[in-house]
Image (cartoon, rainbow, N blue to C red):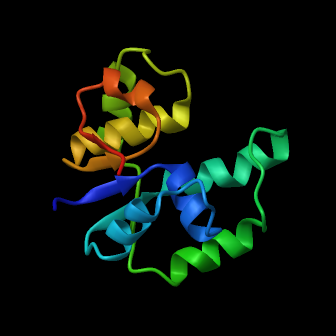
């Protein structure tokens, strides 16, 4: 399989062993070599709980510790990613999802996400 970028909710569900994440998806991700988590996901996780838009079982430190225990790679946001973001149509209003779309396009990554609204963009979305 190609390299993948996981959406923030997928990463949280993995980190918290949440039953919302299908076992097939969890098993597939744990056996892949090129799984990326965007720095945008960590940014989102640091902001949304404080404004009541996301609840975590643990805290930010436990999420970061979970990342450290994986073989996943951190994907930075580049200037090229922000240019792509600027030029994306507004099919999706969440800026964090939109930067993940930009990164998926620019880095030729399959986006692992449950969010079907992302299908309006020229990306390959995977949900097992």
Image vertical order of residue 69 relative to residue 33, above or below: below
Query: Closest to the observer: 91 or 1?
Result: 1
Residue 105: which quarter of the image?
top left
Q: Position of residue 84 (x, y in %)?
A: 31, 30
Query: Closest to the observer: 114 or 60?
Result: 114
Q: Position of residue 87 (x, y in %)?
A: 32, 20
Residue at 36% across / 36% down in the picture?
A: 101
Q: Is there any visible trace of residue 57 in the rendered image?
A: yes
Q: Quadrant of the N terminus?
A: bottom left
Image vertical order of residue 29 relative to residue 48, above or below: below
* Total marks in image: 0
Residue 117: which quarter of the image?
top left
Residue at 41% across / 50% down in the picture?
A: 77
Q: Position of residue 28 (x, y in %)?
A: 32, 67
Q: Does residue 13 appear to the left or right of 109 in the view shown?
A: right
Residue at 76% across / 38% down in the picture?
A: 53
Image vertical order of residue 60 relative to residue 62, above or below: above
Residue at 16% across / 59% down in the picture?
A: 2
Q: Is there any visible trace of residue 75 in the rendered image?
A: no
Residue 72: which quarter of the image?
bottom left
Q: Position of residue 71 (x, y in %)?
A: 38, 80
């Amino acid at each position: 399989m190609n390299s993948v970028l996981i959406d923030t909710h997928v990463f949280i569900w993995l980190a918290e062993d949440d039953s919302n994440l299908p076992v097939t998806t969890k098993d597939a991700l744990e056996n892949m070599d090129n799984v990326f988590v965007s720095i945008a996901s960590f940014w989102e996780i640091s902001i949304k709980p404080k404004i009541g838009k996301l609840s975590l079982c643990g805290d930010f430190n436990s999420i970061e510790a979970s990342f450290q225990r994986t073989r996943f790679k951190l994907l930075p946001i580049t200037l090229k990613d922000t240019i792509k973001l600027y030029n994306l149509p507004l099919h999706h209003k969440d800026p964090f999802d939109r930067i993940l779309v930009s990164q998926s396009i620019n880095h030729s990554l399959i986006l692992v996400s449950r969010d079907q609204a992302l299908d309006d963009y020229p990306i390959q979305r995977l949900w097992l």
